[in-house]
Amino acid sequence: MKKPLIALLPLALFAQQPAAPEKDLVIRDFVNIVISPTTVIDSGGGYVSGLEPKDFKLFDNGKLQTIQQDVSFIPISMVVAIQRSASTELVLPTLKRLGTMLEAMVLGESGEAAIVQFDHRVQILADFTNDGAKLTEALQNLRPGGTASVMNDAVIDSVRMLRNRGPNRRRVILLIAETKDNGSGGRIREALHDVQLNNVIVYPVNMSRWLNKIRTPDQPPRPSPVPPSAMPQVNGAPNTPNTAMQMGYGGTYGNIIPVIQEIFTSTKAVFVSNPQEVLSKYTGGNELDFVGLPGLEDAIQKIGEELHSQYLLSYNPNNKEEGGYHTIRVEVARSGYKVRTRGGYWMAAVPN
């Protein structure tokens, strides 16, 4: 087992103001302390440990910030949210062996995990425990369900569970699912809002959607609700902005930050081709995938190594008067290192 996580922080404290009674989500939150989970990777792809606060420079909206220098050992609280829709039937037996992997590679002596499953609803299979045998026993109850996949609702419910674990825990969601939401009552903006305000890191582990698709029996065809004028164009036809967005060019590829900004500023639902990508980059996590048991073991091992090598850089923003989306950029004062951190956070302007 790897050494306990060394984090640079105190934990974030947030003061929430009551939200206005409007139909759409209205953010009225003022951030006092921001935590930026930061992973440093060397030229060989290995995780870099042993860095000190003086080795980092952190910029909030381009403004240099003062990083807190407190050092703490932070145990992990993790919710494992597993999609159990009908399309995942052949993947679920592999996931039933997840309990021992979590205990050995991620949780350690003081960590804990809970298990939830979701299709058209979210159900708790196991409350928080450090016992790998109990996690394995709960995972035996995984069964394929309906055709829906309420990913956003599962994330929102998982944050609610983590919120009650106290301020001295490292909060993580391991989201094992296909890369789309289908049927959630909550929107991606609400999920992003909740993970931000509660300092939750999201690690999506993608099921192979194309593999699930070819293994799932065909369903009887249904009449298309999309009028012919809204159908994607044929091969070779020039793309319009609408058809480019339908094909995923607006979010899955390139810079994800404009997508996150649009999610928070738009008053209507926004097309997001891959919500998992947004959740991971917004919180500082890492999006992985797997096919089969060896692939799952490799993904869990990578997540465990990263969590136990990650730096939690915390700071009190010196630019609270700047409302809207704040971008975060972290630099390391050593050449040859790559840095990954959360893309930013949303904050209402604090009056002077």
Image (cartoon, grey):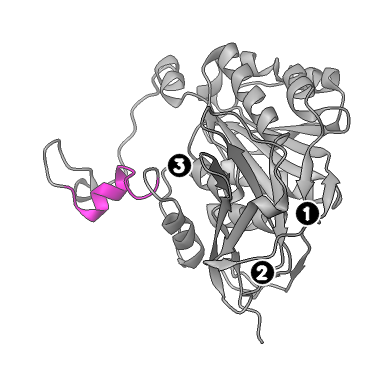
Marks 3 and 1, the one that precedes in the sequence: 1
Check contact, mark 2 vs mark 1: CB within 8 A: no
Using the image, tell me which numbered label, if any, was put on residue 274: 3
Crowdedness of circle 3 by 10 Å Cα count: few (<14), some, many (20+)? some
Choose top left, top right, bottom left or bottom right for residue 30.
bottom right
Mark pair 3, 2: CA separation: 30 Å
Q: Amino acid at mark 2?
A: Pro
Q: Amino acid at mark 3?
A: Asn
Choose top left, top right, bottom left or bottom right for residue 143.
top right
Marks 3 and 2, the one that precedes in the sequence: 3
Q: Position of residue 114 (x, y in %)?
A: 78, 33
Choose top left, top right, bottom left or bottom right for residue 262.
bottom left
Q: Nearer the viewer, residue 265 or 186?
A: 265
Q: Position of residue 130 (x, y in %)?
A: 86, 28
Residue lying at 40% horizontally and 43% vertically, measured from the top left: 252
Residue under pointer 1: 9
Residue under pointer 2: 317
Residue lying at 71% horizontally and 49% vertically, measured from the top left: 312
Residue lying at 57% horizontally and 45% vertically, measured from the top left: 334
Crowdedness of circle 2 by 10 Å Cα count: few (<14), some, many (20+)? many
* Vertical comparison of 294 with 329: above or below: above
Side of 213 where 127 appears, left or right: right
Name the secondary structure under disc 3.
Answer: loop
Side of 217 where 326 appears, left or right: right
Identify the image quadrant of the C terminus: bottom right
Identify the image quadrant of the N terminus: top right
Marks 2 and 1, the one that precedes in the sequence: 1
Which residues lie in the magenta part? 239-251
Side of 3 where 177 appears, left or right: left
